[in-house]
Image (cartoon, rainbow, N blue to C red):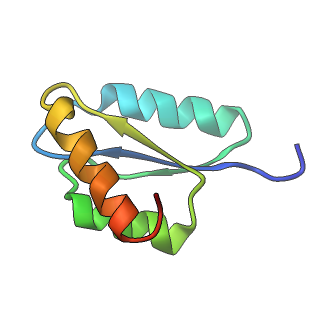
Amino acid sequence: MDIKPKVLVTKIGFDGHDRGSRVVAAFLHDAAMDEIYTPPWQEIPTVVKLATEEDVDVIGISSLATDHLIVPKLMAALKEAGLG
């Protein structure tokens, strides 16, 4: 693959269990992808800003709880920022 996909792996909200997201980030790295890993407890505006600044291709969200509330809010914020 000539172009390495850039993937943002993040934890949004108050879920601090980040083992799974760290494993996914390591797997992406081993698969020769350009991964950006954030620590837990990120806020949606921070994730949108980082996705914009880093020009990511994909955002991977890890959540143990309330993802049914977080993902729609993130999608709306991404669309508002022109990343929909």
In depth, the one of 9 and 68 nearer the eye is 68
Residue 61 percent location from the top left of the image: 36, 39
Quarter holding residue 21: top left
Q: Is residue 67 left or right of residue 20?
A: left
**For the point 60% across and 53% down, which residue is it?**
57
Q: Which residue occupies the extreme right position in the image?
A: 2
Left or right: 40 in relation to 49:
left
Answer above or below: position of 81 versus 78: below
Residue in the foreground of this view, choosing between 48 and 84: 84
Name above or below for residue 51 compared with residue 27. below
- Percent position of residue 3, x then y: 82, 53
Number of numbered callouts drawn: 0
Residue at 49%, 30% in the rendered image:
24
Percent coordinates x, y for residue 25 in the rendering: 50, 37
Q: Quadrant of residue 55?
A: bottom right
Image quadrant holding the N terminus, namely: top right
Measured as percent of width and height from the top left, residue 46 is found at 28, 66
- Image point (47%, 63%), residue name: 83
Indicate whether 81 appears above or below 33: below
Q: Nearer the viewer, residue 69 or 21?
A: 69
Q: Nearer the viewer, residue 74 or 56?
A: 74
Tell me the residue at 41%/34% (across/down): 22
